[in-house]
Image (tube, rainbow, N blue to C red):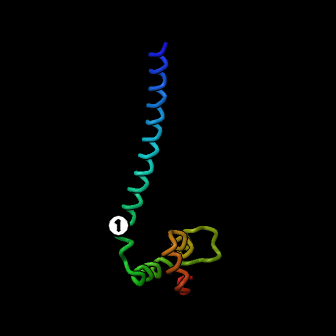
């Protein structure tokens, strides 16, 4: 009986360890994705270059439209806080 209890306890411990390792694996994958994102070439572009790209993309802005395709300034400003700041600081995009 004691051997059976020990075996059950070991199985429980190993199941707990598996859950812990799976959670740790998920966290590491997310960290890896974030670090890859930080090294992305688009993040190295100066704000002025991005503003010029946005200016070109927003030539057909239609603020009365109901689709993001017709409102590139709104779509661009939704990407990240940096891009939102660039769009907000350059009213000509609107």
- Residue lying furthest top in this view? 1
Q: Nearer the viewer, residue 89 or 52?
A: 89
User: Hey, which quadrant is residue 63 in on the image?
Assistant: bottom right
Task: Give left or right: position of 41 versus 2.
Answer: left
| Relative image position of residue 61 (x, y in whole percent) | 56, 78
Reply above or below: 3 against 44: above
Which residue is at 50% across, 70% downward? Answer: 80
Reply above or below: 19 against 33: above
What kind of element bears circle 1?
loop
Q: Nearer the viewer, residue 8 or 38?
A: 8
User: Hey, which quadrant is residue 88 in on the image?
Assistant: bottom right
Q: How dense is the environment of label 1, judged by Cα within 10 Å: few (below 14), some, or many (20 and up)?
A: few
Which residue is at 49% across, 12% downward? Answer: 1
| Relative image position of residue 34 (x, y in whole percent) | 41, 60
| Relative image position of residue 53 (x, y in whole percent) | 42, 79
Q: Nearer the viewer, residue 65 or 50?
A: 50
The residue pinned by badge 1 equals: 39
Which residue is at 38% across, 71% downward? Answer: 42
Q: Nearer the viewer, residue 50 or 28?
A: 28
> Which quarter of the image is occupied by the C terminus?
bottom right
Which residue is at 39% across, 72% downward? Answer: 43
Q: Give the number of callouts.
A: 1
| Relative image position of residue 23 (x, y in whole percent) | 46, 44
- Residue lying furthest front in this view? 2
């Amino acid at each position: 009986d004691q051997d059976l209890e020990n075996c059950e306890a070991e199985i429980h411990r190993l199941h707990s360890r598996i859950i812990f390792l799976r959670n740790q694996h998920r966290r590491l994958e997310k960290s890896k994705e974030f670090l890859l994102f930080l090294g992305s070439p688009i993040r190295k572009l100066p704000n002025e270059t991005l503003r010029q790209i946005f200016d070109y993309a927003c030539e057909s802005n239609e603020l009365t439209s109901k689709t993001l395709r017709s409102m590139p300034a709104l779509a661009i400003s939704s990407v990240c806080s940096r891009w939102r700041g660039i769009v907000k600081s350059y009213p000509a995009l609107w």
